[in-house]
Amino acid sequence: MTDDILIRMLSFLPIKNAGATSTLSRRWRFLWCNITRLDFDGSEALEKTDHDPNLFASELDKFVKQVNYVIQRHDQPTIEVFQIRYNLDKSNREDIDSWLQFALDKKVEKLHLDLSYKDHGSSDPEENYDFPLPTSYGNMIYLGELPILNAKVVGLQSLKKVFLKGVNISEPNLLGLLKNSPHLESLSLDHSGLFPHIHVGGWDINLKHFTIVTCYDVESISLYDFDLESFLYNGEVINLSLIDLPVLKLLNISEGSFVLKNDVLAKISSVASSLQFLCLKLDRLKISFDVNSIPQLPKVKKLMLLVEAEEDNSLLELTSIAKACPLLEEFSIELLWESPIQKRTEVRHAAPHRHEHLKFFYMGGYFGRISDLELAVYVIDNAVALRKIIIDPICMFHTDCFSDEDHMKREEVARSSAERELRPRLPKGVELVIV
Protein backbone atom coordinates (compact mmCIF):
# COMPACT_ATOMS: atom_id res chain seq x y z
CA MET A 1 0.00 0.00 0.00
CA THR A 2 1.07 3.56 -0.66
CA ASP A 3 1.83 6.00 2.14
CA ASP A 4 -1.30 7.99 1.25
CA ILE A 5 -3.51 4.94 1.86
CA LEU A 6 -1.76 4.15 5.15
CA ILE A 7 -2.14 7.75 6.31
CA ARG A 8 -5.81 7.66 5.43
CA MET A 9 -6.23 4.50 7.51
CA LEU A 10 -4.35 6.02 10.45
CA SER A 11 -6.64 9.06 10.33
CA PHE A 12 -9.53 6.94 11.59
CA LEU A 13 -7.65 5.81 14.70
CA PRO A 14 -7.52 7.65 18.03
CA ILE A 15 -4.36 9.72 18.23
CA LYS A 16 -2.84 7.48 20.89
CA ASN A 17 -3.17 4.41 18.67
CA ALA A 18 -2.04 6.23 15.54
CA GLY A 19 1.08 7.49 17.30
CA ALA A 20 1.89 4.01 18.57
CA THR A 21 2.44 2.85 14.97
CA SER A 22 5.64 4.91 14.86
CA THR A 23 7.47 2.01 16.53
CA LEU A 24 6.55 -0.54 13.85
CA SER A 25 9.37 0.28 11.43
CA ARG A 26 11.36 3.13 9.93
CA ARG A 27 8.70 3.62 7.26
CA TRP A 28 5.98 4.04 9.88
CA ARG A 29 7.95 6.37 12.14
CA PHE A 30 6.52 9.68 10.90
CA LEU A 31 3.44 8.59 8.96
CA TRP A 32 1.14 9.48 11.84
CA CYS A 33 2.31 13.10 11.64
CA ASN A 34 0.39 13.40 8.36
CA ILE A 35 -3.03 12.22 9.46
CA THR A 36 -5.92 14.56 8.67
CA ARG A 37 -8.36 13.44 11.37
CA LEU A 38 -7.05 14.49 14.78
CA ASP A 39 -9.22 12.82 17.43
CA PHE A 40 -8.01 13.56 20.97
CA ASP A 41 -10.36 11.40 23.02
CA GLY A 42 -9.46 11.34 26.71
CA SER A 43 -12.61 9.57 27.87
CA GLU A 44 -10.77 6.37 28.79
CA ALA A 45 -8.35 8.23 31.05
CA LEU A 46 -11.18 10.24 32.60
CA GLU A 47 -13.01 7.10 33.68
CA LYS A 48 -10.09 6.31 35.99
CA THR A 49 -10.04 9.70 37.70
CA ASP A 50 -13.45 9.77 39.39
CA HIS A 51 -13.25 11.13 42.95
CA ASP A 52 -9.45 11.41 42.76
CA PRO A 53 -8.39 15.03 42.14
CA ASN A 54 -4.69 14.19 42.23
CA LEU A 55 -5.07 11.55 39.54
CA PHE A 56 -7.24 13.91 37.50
CA ALA A 57 -4.56 16.61 37.62
CA SER A 58 -1.95 14.09 36.52
CA GLU A 59 -4.06 12.79 33.63
CA LEU A 60 -4.96 16.33 32.57
CA ASP A 61 -1.29 17.25 32.36
CA LYS A 62 -0.64 14.16 30.21
CA PHE A 63 -3.56 15.00 27.92
CA VAL A 64 -2.47 18.61 27.38
CA LYS A 65 1.10 17.54 26.66
CA GLN A 66 -0.12 14.90 24.20
CA VAL A 67 -2.18 17.42 22.23
CA ASN A 68 0.67 19.94 22.17
CA TYR A 69 3.15 17.24 21.11
CA VAL A 70 1.00 16.18 18.18
CA ILE A 71 0.14 19.60 16.81
CA GLN A 72 3.78 20.69 17.00
CA ARG A 73 4.75 17.76 14.77
CA HIS A 74 1.80 17.72 12.40
CA ASP A 75 3.08 17.96 8.84
CA GLN A 76 0.01 18.40 6.62
CA PRO A 77 -1.29 21.80 5.42
CA THR A 78 -4.92 20.87 6.11
CA ILE A 79 -6.99 18.67 8.40
CA GLU A 80 -10.51 17.31 8.02
CA VAL A 81 -11.43 16.76 11.67
CA PHE A 82 -10.18 18.24 14.93
CA GLN A 83 -11.81 16.77 18.05
CA ILE A 84 -11.13 17.35 21.73
CA ARG A 85 -13.01 15.23 24.27
CA TYR A 86 -11.90 15.94 27.81
CA ASN A 87 -13.07 17.71 30.94
CA LEU A 88 -11.64 21.20 30.44
CA ASP A 89 -12.76 24.71 31.41
CA LYS A 90 -11.73 28.35 31.29
CA SER A 91 -8.66 27.67 33.42
CA ASN A 92 -7.27 25.87 30.35
CA ARG A 93 -8.01 28.82 28.07
CA GLU A 94 -4.45 29.44 26.89
CA ASP A 95 -3.96 25.85 25.71
CA ILE A 96 -7.40 25.55 24.12
CA ASP A 97 -6.94 28.88 22.32
CA SER A 98 -3.70 27.62 20.81
CA TRP A 99 -5.33 24.34 19.73
CA LEU A 100 -8.17 26.21 18.06
CA GLN A 101 -5.73 28.52 16.32
CA PHE A 102 -3.86 25.47 15.02
CA ALA A 103 -7.04 23.81 13.75
CA LEU A 104 -8.28 26.94 12.01
CA ASP A 105 -4.86 27.63 10.50
CA LYS A 106 -4.97 24.07 9.12
CA LYS A 107 -8.34 24.87 7.50
CA VAL A 108 -10.25 22.34 9.59
CA GLU A 109 -13.63 21.26 8.18
CA LYS A 110 -15.19 19.61 11.25
CA LEU A 111 -14.52 21.06 14.69
CA HIS A 112 -15.70 19.07 17.74
CA LEU A 113 -15.10 20.37 21.26
CA ASP A 114 -16.61 18.26 24.05
CA LEU A 115 -15.18 19.86 27.16
CA SER A 116 -17.61 18.44 29.71
CA TYR A 117 -17.28 14.76 28.91
CA LYS A 118 -16.54 13.56 32.44
CA ASP A 119 -19.33 15.65 33.98
CA HIS A 120 -21.79 14.68 31.24
CA GLY A 121 -22.73 18.29 30.81
CA SER A 122 -23.34 19.01 34.50
CA SER A 123 -20.45 21.42 35.00
CA ASP A 124 -20.98 25.02 36.08
CA PRO A 125 -21.51 27.15 32.93
CA GLU A 126 -19.69 30.02 34.60
CA GLU A 127 -16.57 27.85 34.56
CA ASN A 128 -16.93 26.86 30.90
CA TYR A 129 -14.39 27.81 28.27
CA ASP A 130 -15.57 30.71 26.09
CA PHE A 131 -15.41 30.18 22.34
CA PRO A 132 -13.23 32.81 20.61
CA LEU A 133 -12.72 33.85 16.99
CA PRO A 134 -9.43 34.20 15.06
CA THR A 135 -8.22 37.64 13.95
CA SER A 136 -6.01 38.99 11.21
CA TYR A 137 -3.32 39.48 13.88
CA GLY A 138 -3.04 35.72 14.39
CA ASN A 139 -4.62 35.65 17.83
CA MET A 140 -8.00 34.67 19.26
CA ILE A 141 -10.50 37.24 20.54
CA TYR A 142 -13.80 37.37 22.38
CA LEU A 143 -15.94 40.01 20.71
CA GLY A 144 -17.68 40.73 23.99
CA GLU A 145 -14.37 41.91 25.45
CA LEU A 146 -13.24 45.51 25.08
CA PRO A 147 -11.22 47.12 23.67
CA ILE A 148 -10.92 45.21 20.39
CA LEU A 149 -8.43 47.70 18.86
CA ASN A 150 -9.42 47.36 15.18
CA ALA A 151 -9.17 43.58 15.26
CA LYS A 152 -10.82 41.93 12.27
CA VAL A 153 -12.22 38.43 12.35
CA VAL A 154 -10.65 36.17 9.76
CA GLY A 155 -13.01 34.45 7.34
CA LEU A 156 -13.37 30.77 8.25
CA GLN A 157 -13.68 29.49 4.70
CA SER A 158 -13.16 25.80 5.44
CA LEU A 159 -15.50 25.21 8.40
CA LYS A 160 -18.44 22.95 7.58
CA LYS A 161 -19.46 21.51 10.94
CA VAL A 162 -19.04 22.76 14.53
CA PHE A 163 -20.03 20.88 17.71
CA LEU A 164 -19.58 22.61 21.07
CA LYS A 165 -20.37 20.94 24.40
CA GLY A 166 -19.57 22.58 27.71
CA VAL A 167 -18.37 25.60 25.74
CA ASN A 168 -19.91 29.06 26.15
CA ILE A 169 -20.40 31.40 23.24
CA SER A 170 -21.41 35.05 23.41
CA GLU A 171 -23.90 36.69 21.07
CA PRO A 172 -21.23 38.64 19.13
CA ASN A 173 -19.07 35.54 18.74
CA LEU A 174 -22.00 33.37 17.63
CA LEU A 175 -22.99 35.88 14.98
CA GLY A 176 -19.34 36.35 14.05
CA LEU A 177 -18.94 32.59 13.61
CA LEU A 178 -22.05 32.34 11.43
CA LYS A 179 -21.35 35.36 9.26
CA ASN A 180 -17.64 34.60 8.75
CA SER A 181 -18.10 30.90 7.93
CA PRO A 182 -19.67 30.85 4.45
CA HIS A 183 -19.59 27.05 4.23
CA LEU A 184 -20.73 26.25 7.78
CA GLU A 185 -23.67 23.87 7.41
CA SER A 186 -24.06 22.34 10.88
CA LEU A 187 -23.85 23.92 14.34
CA SER A 188 -24.59 22.04 17.59
CA LEU A 189 -24.55 23.68 21.01
CA ASP A 190 -24.84 21.31 23.96
CA HIS A 191 -24.77 22.31 27.65
CA SER A 192 -23.35 25.67 26.64
CA GLY A 193 -23.79 29.01 28.32
CA LEU A 194 -25.50 31.27 25.81
CA PHE A 195 -27.54 34.49 26.11
CA PRO A 196 -31.24 35.32 26.59
CA HIS A 197 -32.39 36.12 23.07
CA ILE A 198 -31.01 34.22 20.10
CA HIS A 199 -31.70 35.78 16.71
CA VAL A 200 -30.31 33.99 13.67
CA GLY A 201 -31.30 34.94 10.16
CA GLY A 202 -30.59 36.82 6.97
CA TRP A 203 -29.42 36.06 3.45
CA ASP A 204 -25.76 35.81 4.55
CA ILE A 205 -26.44 32.82 6.87
CA ASN A 206 -25.72 29.50 5.15
CA LEU A 207 -26.43 27.22 8.11
CA LYS A 208 -28.45 24.10 7.22
CA HIS A 209 -28.63 22.23 10.54
CA PHE A 210 -28.95 23.87 13.98
CA THR A 211 -29.11 22.03 17.33
CA ILE A 212 -29.49 23.51 20.82
CA VAL A 213 -29.54 21.04 23.73
CA THR A 214 -29.79 22.00 27.42
CA CYS A 215 -28.19 25.40 27.00
CA TYR A 216 -28.27 27.95 29.79
CA ASP A 217 -29.87 31.41 30.00
CA VAL A 218 -31.91 31.10 26.78
CA GLU A 219 -35.33 32.78 26.92
CA SER A 220 -36.23 33.04 23.25
CA ILE A 221 -35.08 31.79 19.86
CA SER A 222 -35.93 33.50 16.60
CA LEU A 223 -34.91 31.86 13.32
CA TYR A 224 -35.82 33.66 10.13
CA ASP A 225 -35.13 34.19 6.45
CA PHE A 226 -32.47 31.59 5.60
CA ASP A 227 -32.34 28.09 4.16
CA LEU A 228 -32.36 26.09 7.39
CA GLU A 229 -33.15 22.41 6.78
CA SER A 230 -33.29 21.01 10.34
CA PHE A 231 -33.71 22.44 13.84
CA LEU A 232 -33.58 20.54 17.13
CA TYR A 233 -34.28 22.13 20.50
CA ASN A 234 -34.23 20.41 23.87
CA GLY A 235 -34.25 22.59 26.94
CA GLU A 236 -36.22 24.92 29.16
CA VAL A 237 -39.48 26.56 28.15
CA ILE A 238 -38.76 29.46 25.79
CA ASN A 239 -40.49 31.61 23.21
CA LEU A 240 -39.91 30.24 19.73
CA SER A 241 -40.33 32.04 16.43
CA LEU A 242 -39.83 30.36 13.05
CA ILE A 243 -40.37 32.70 10.11
CA ASP A 244 -39.55 32.41 6.41
CA LEU A 245 -37.66 29.12 6.57
CA PRO A 246 -38.80 27.77 3.20
CA VAL A 247 -36.78 24.52 3.16
CA LEU A 248 -37.10 23.44 6.80
CA LYS A 249 -37.63 19.68 6.60
CA LEU A 250 -36.92 18.44 10.13
CA LEU A 251 -38.23 19.97 13.35
CA ASN A 252 -37.57 18.35 16.73
CA ILE A 253 -38.89 20.08 19.85
CA SER A 254 -38.12 17.78 22.77
CA GLU A 255 -39.56 19.71 25.69
CA GLY A 256 -43.01 18.73 26.84
CA SER A 257 -44.40 21.76 28.63
CA PHE A 258 -42.76 23.93 25.98
CA VAL A 259 -44.99 22.53 23.25
CA LEU A 260 -48.24 23.03 25.15
CA LYS A 261 -47.55 26.24 27.06
CA ASN A 262 -46.19 28.05 24.03
CA ASP A 263 -48.69 26.61 21.55
CA VAL A 264 -45.90 25.42 19.28
CA LEU A 265 -48.37 23.45 17.18
CA ALA A 266 -49.88 26.74 16.06
CA LYS A 267 -46.57 28.56 15.76
CA ILE A 268 -45.12 26.06 13.28
CA SER A 269 -47.80 26.97 10.75
CA SER A 270 -45.33 29.24 8.95
CA VAL A 271 -43.06 26.26 8.22
CA ALA A 272 -45.70 23.52 8.06
CA SER A 273 -45.76 23.32 4.28
CA SER A 274 -42.11 22.18 4.01
CA LEU A 275 -41.76 19.84 7.01
CA GLN A 276 -41.10 16.16 6.30
CA PHE A 277 -40.10 14.97 9.81
CA LEU A 278 -41.72 16.27 12.99
CA CYS A 279 -40.81 15.25 16.54
CA LEU A 280 -42.61 16.75 19.53
CA LYS A 281 -42.60 16.03 23.24
CA LEU A 282 -45.96 16.46 24.94
CA ASP A 283 -46.60 16.24 28.66
CA ARG A 284 -49.67 15.81 30.83
CA LEU A 285 -52.25 15.05 28.17
CA LYS A 286 -55.01 15.74 30.67
CA ILE A 287 -54.13 19.37 29.89
CA SER A 288 -55.86 19.38 26.54
CA PHE A 289 -54.35 21.17 23.58
CA ASP A 290 -56.49 22.85 20.95
CA VAL A 291 -56.77 20.41 18.06
CA ASN A 292 -57.98 23.27 15.88
CA SER A 293 -54.58 24.93 16.25
CA ILE A 294 -52.83 22.06 14.48
CA PRO A 295 -51.83 23.20 10.99
CA GLN A 296 -51.99 20.96 7.97
CA LEU A 297 -48.66 19.19 7.47
CA PRO A 298 -48.88 18.23 3.80
CA LYS A 299 -45.36 16.78 3.42
CA VAL A 300 -44.72 15.14 6.80
CA LYS A 301 -43.82 11.48 6.31
CA LYS A 302 -42.36 10.75 9.74
CA LEU A 303 -44.07 11.76 12.98
CA MET A 304 -42.58 11.06 16.41
CA LEU A 305 -44.35 11.97 19.64
CA LEU A 306 -42.73 11.66 23.07
CA VAL A 307 -45.59 11.65 25.54
CA GLU A 308 -45.56 12.14 29.30
CA ALA A 309 -48.76 10.35 30.30
CA GLU A 310 -50.64 10.08 33.59
CA GLU A 311 -53.04 7.57 35.08
CA ASP A 312 -54.91 6.02 32.14
CA ASN A 313 -55.75 9.18 30.21
CA SER A 314 -56.75 8.59 26.62
CA LEU A 315 -54.08 8.97 23.96
CA LEU A 316 -56.59 9.27 21.14
CA GLU A 317 -56.21 13.05 21.11
CA LEU A 318 -52.80 12.46 19.54
CA THR A 319 -54.44 11.10 16.41
CA SER A 320 -55.42 14.66 15.49
CA ILE A 321 -51.76 15.38 14.75
CA ALA A 322 -51.46 12.25 12.60
CA LYS A 323 -54.64 13.23 10.74
CA ALA A 324 -52.99 16.51 9.76
CA CYS A 325 -50.31 14.53 7.86
CA PRO A 326 -51.89 13.14 4.66
CA LEU A 327 -48.60 11.58 3.47
CA LEU A 328 -47.65 10.06 6.82
CA GLU A 329 -45.66 6.82 6.42
CA GLU A 330 -44.09 6.30 9.86
CA PHE A 331 -45.78 7.06 13.18
CA SER A 332 -43.84 6.57 16.44
CA ILE A 333 -45.01 7.17 19.99
CA GLU A 334 -42.90 6.78 23.12
CA LEU A 335 -44.80 6.87 26.40
CA LEU A 336 -43.24 8.05 29.64
CA TRP A 337 -45.67 7.15 32.41
CA GLU A 338 -45.82 9.18 35.61
CA SER A 339 -48.35 6.91 37.36
CA PRO A 340 -48.15 3.26 36.35
CA ILE A 341 -50.96 1.71 38.41
CA GLN A 342 -54.35 3.32 37.76
CA LYS A 343 -56.46 1.79 35.01
CA ARG A 344 -59.92 2.41 33.58
CA THR A 345 -62.34 0.00 31.95
CA GLU A 346 -64.24 2.27 29.57
CA VAL A 347 -63.01 1.94 25.97
CA ARG A 348 -63.13 5.03 23.77
CA HIS A 349 -62.95 5.39 20.01
CA ALA A 350 -61.61 8.16 17.81
CA ALA A 351 -63.48 9.24 14.70
CA PRO A 352 -62.32 7.06 11.81
CA HIS A 353 -59.80 8.56 9.41
CA ARG A 354 -58.26 6.74 6.47
CA HIS A 355 -54.44 6.90 6.53
CA GLU A 356 -53.53 5.99 2.96
CA HIS A 357 -49.74 5.87 3.30
CA LEU A 358 -49.07 4.81 6.91
CA LYS A 359 -46.89 1.68 6.75
CA PHE A 360 -45.05 1.60 10.08
CA PHE A 361 -46.23 2.15 13.67
CA TYR A 362 -43.99 2.03 16.76
CA MET A 363 -45.25 2.25 20.33
CA GLY A 364 -42.71 2.40 23.14
CA GLY A 365 -43.76 2.16 26.77
CA TYR A 366 -46.78 0.00 25.93
CA PHE A 367 -48.18 -0.97 29.31
CA GLY A 368 -51.32 -2.87 28.43
CA ARG A 369 -53.69 -0.16 29.61
CA ILE A 370 -56.92 0.73 27.87
CA SER A 371 -55.28 3.92 26.58
CA ASP A 372 -52.47 1.91 24.94
CA LEU A 373 -54.93 -0.47 23.35
CA GLU A 374 -57.19 2.32 22.06
CA LEU A 375 -54.37 3.97 20.15
CA ALA A 376 -52.95 0.75 18.72
CA VAL A 377 -56.42 -0.37 17.58
CA TYR A 378 -57.02 3.03 15.95
CA VAL A 379 -53.89 2.57 13.83
CA ILE A 380 -54.78 -1.03 12.93
CA ASP A 381 -58.29 -0.03 11.88
CA ASN A 382 -57.38 3.10 9.89
CA ALA A 383 -53.94 2.53 8.33
CA VAL A 384 -54.90 0.76 5.11
CA ALA A 385 -51.27 0.40 3.93
CA LEU A 386 -49.95 -0.82 7.29
CA ARG A 387 -47.10 -3.33 7.05
CA LYS A 388 -45.45 -3.45 10.47
CA ILE A 389 -46.21 -2.69 14.13
CA ILE A 390 -43.54 -2.71 16.83
CA ILE A 391 -44.69 -2.84 20.44
CA ASP A 392 -41.96 -2.15 23.01
CA PRO A 393 -43.18 -2.63 26.59
CA ILE A 394 -40.09 -1.23 28.26
CA CYS A 395 -41.17 0.46 31.49
CA MET A 396 -40.39 4.16 31.27
CA PHE A 397 -41.48 5.94 34.44
CA HIS A 398 -40.56 9.24 36.04
CA THR A 399 -40.70 7.66 39.47
CA ASP A 400 -38.43 5.01 40.96
CA CYS A 401 -41.23 3.32 42.87
CA PHE A 402 -40.54 -0.10 41.36
CA SER A 403 -37.65 -2.48 41.70
CA ASP A 404 -35.94 -4.00 38.68
CA GLU A 405 -37.84 -7.21 39.35
CA ASP A 406 -41.16 -5.32 39.32
CA HIS A 407 -40.22 -3.68 36.04
CA MET A 408 -39.48 -7.04 34.46
CA LYS A 409 -42.78 -8.50 35.66
CA ARG A 410 -44.77 -5.55 34.36
CA GLU A 411 -43.02 -5.68 31.00
CA GLU A 412 -43.83 -9.37 30.69
CA VAL A 413 -47.49 -8.71 31.52
CA ALA A 414 -47.51 -5.97 28.87
CA ARG A 415 -46.07 -8.36 26.27
CA SER A 416 -48.75 -10.92 27.03
CA SER A 417 -51.44 -8.25 26.82
CA ALA A 418 -50.20 -7.01 23.44
CA GLU A 419 -50.08 -10.56 22.08
CA ARG A 420 -53.57 -11.33 23.34
CA GLU A 421 -55.29 -8.07 22.38
CA LEU A 422 -53.56 -7.00 19.18
CA ARG A 423 -52.60 -10.05 17.15
CA PRO A 424 -56.19 -11.23 16.57
CA ARG A 425 -57.05 -7.77 15.21
CA LEU A 426 -54.28 -7.65 12.60
CA PRO A 427 -55.24 -7.63 8.93
CA LYS A 428 -53.53 -10.16 6.72
CA GLY A 429 -49.99 -9.16 5.76
CA VAL A 430 -49.31 -6.96 8.79
CA GLU A 431 -46.30 -7.98 10.90
CA LEU A 432 -46.49 -7.58 14.68
CA VAL A 433 -43.19 -7.44 16.57
CA ILE A 434 -43.32 -7.44 20.37
CA VAL A 435 -39.89 -6.56 21.71
Image: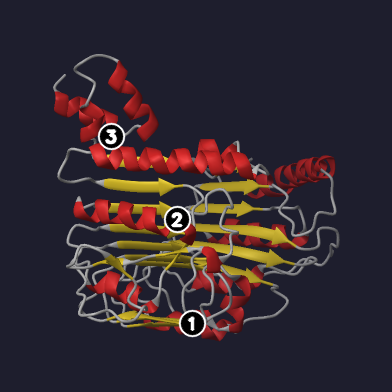
Q: Foreground residue, 101 or 181?
A: 101
Coordinates of residue 338 in the picture (x, y in percent): 77, 63
Res. 340 image quadrant? bottom right
Q: Which amino acid type is shown beneath numbered disc 1?
A: Pro
Figure quadrant of residue 339: bottom right
Secondary structure type for disc 3: loop
Residue 344: image location, x then y, percent: 84, 65
Tag nearer the camera, 3 or 2: 2
Categorize mark 2 by other alpha carbons within 10 Å: few (<14), some (14-19), many (20+).
Answer: few
| Residue at image coords 24%, 56% | 104
Looking at the image, which is closer to me, 380 or 325? Answer: 325
Q: CA distance from mark 3 to mark 1?
A: 39 Å
Residue 401 can be seen, yes or no: yes
Q: Amino acid at mark 2?
A: Asn
Amino acid on which the number 3 mark rests in the picture: Ser
Q: CA distance from mark 2 to mark 1?
A: 26 Å
Residue drawn at 69 percent across, 47 percent down: 394
The answer to whether residue 271 is above or below residue 10 is below
The numbered mark at residue 196 is 1
Which image quadrant: the C terminus?
A: top right
Mark 3 / mark 1, whichever is N-terminal? 3
- Helix, strand or loop at label 1? It is loop
| Residue that mark 3 sits on | 11
Residue 92, disc = 2
From what the image shows, is residue 193 above or below residue 427?
below
Q: Nearer the viewer, mark 2 or mark 1?
A: 2
